[in-house]
Amino acid sequence: MASTEQAFEFLLPVMAREQLDMVALVGGANFQRLFRWDFHQNERPLVVMLTREGKAAAVVPHLEMPSFEPLGFTGDVFLWRDEEGFEGAFQAAGAKLKGVKRIGVEGQRMRVFEHLAMLRAFPGAAIVDAHAAISAIRLHKSADEIEQMRAAIRISEIALANTIDAVKIGMTETQIEGILVEKLFAAGAQSLAFPPIVAAGGNSAQSHAKARPDYKVQAGDALLFDFGGAVGGYNADITRTFFLGHVSDADRAFYDAVNAANAVGRAMAKPGMTASALDDAVLGSLEASPYAHLMRHKTGHGLGLEVHEDPYIMRGNGTVLAEGMVFTIEPGLYEKDRIGVRIEDDVVVTKTGTEVLTSFPRELTVIG
């Protein structure tokens, strides 16, 4: 199926449901899912417009045309060069797609200067945030997409095993991070899902810590890895927490509480339950522990072309889990300036239950 035909197949129902005359897409995960190509957003706007009447147009920088041509886009293409600016291309697209009054855009992706250019090209039109409705095209992963994620997860777990084998007390967090990145690419990662988190001791209590070049890991430290490789644009997202040299009884109990909550999530997740109910079960496990006051975040998030996407596994989210949804289960506890423990797995919903895609051991492990 040509990419433009596929885009209409996915987006025409969205436009009908949301009462949109047109959808305007910019570079990102939705664009990549529809057109099989990821355009990096920079100072040059590239916008594809698809109308409810079946018309298509694209504003494309001349620089990007060699990459755009292979997409098989069958609509009108309005090119622009740096020296002339993009305004004329937007105006030409607006003249071609007449009668558009309500435009759906990706509110988390479209930038202000693109938004303003659209308003000038379609005077009188309302631009509405349809990010959730558009992104829903990626909510249920196909078998091929899941296989790409399996590959990314397998590579990531190999890299983690090889990294912890190399960790020694006295290394800095940034040295360990460098080893992890090297091992990811050596194992076959095509890119990083996100800049990895490697955090020891008190730094592990920072949910999104950055590796420190001046901290040498010590015996008794917790050492948290939150990372993933990507294959074909599809991401892994894994967290494991280890201890260096030895572990105290207090830290073992702390770890066990998180591990128990993770096990509840993996056991209970199933089609037909809501994201809210799953989060309630996992957080309920932590709330029943002595560490309820050290909770900081929800159970998890969707995973695919983006590291964070729908469905979000959190209280109040009535999304019903269904076949093909992929998300994380990642409970955590954090005691400021002392210790953080998070255990994160990636799961896919099947017809009858869930399959845990990650397999790296979860039992408390002392390394170094």
Image (cartoon, helix red, strand yellow):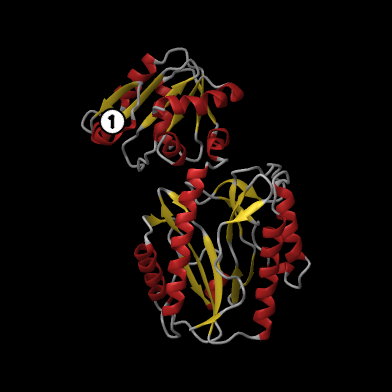
Q: Residue at x 72, y 71 (%)?
A: 291
Q: Residue at x 24, y 34 (%)?
A: 66
For this view, does 182 lie left or right of residue 308?
A: left
- Front-most of residues 81 and 260: 260
Quadrant of res 266? bottom right
In the rendered image, the vertical position of residue 63 relative to residue 338, given as above or below: above
- What is the crowding at mark 1: few (fewer than 14 residues within 10 Å), some, or many (at least 20)? few
Q: Residue at x 71, y 42 (%)?
A: 318
Residue 325 visible? The answer is yes
| Residue 79 position within the rendered picture, expressed as x and y whole percent measured from the top left | 27, 26
Residue lying at the far top of the rendered structure: 99
Residue 212 visible? The answer is no
Determine the secondary structure under disc 1. Answer: helix
| Residue 365 position within the rendered picture, expressed as x and y whole percent measured from the top left | 57, 78
Residue lying at the far left of the rendered structure: 83
The amino acid sitting under disc 1 is Glu
- Quadrant occupied by the N terminus: top left
Residue matched to label 1: 69
In the rendered image, the vertical position of residue 226 relative to residue 24, given as above or below: below
Q: Residue at x 37, y 14 (%)?
A: 95
| Residue 84 position within the rendered picture, expressed as x and y whole percent measured from the top left | 23, 28
Residue lying at the far right of the rendered structure: 288
In the rendered image, the vertical position of residue 140 relative to residue 359, given as above or below: above
| Residue 262 position within the rendered picture, expressed as x and y whole percent measured from the top left | 66, 64
For this view, does 84 lie left or right of residue 23?
A: left
In the rendered image, the vertical position of residue 300 relative to residue 205, given as above or below: above
Number of marks in picture: 1
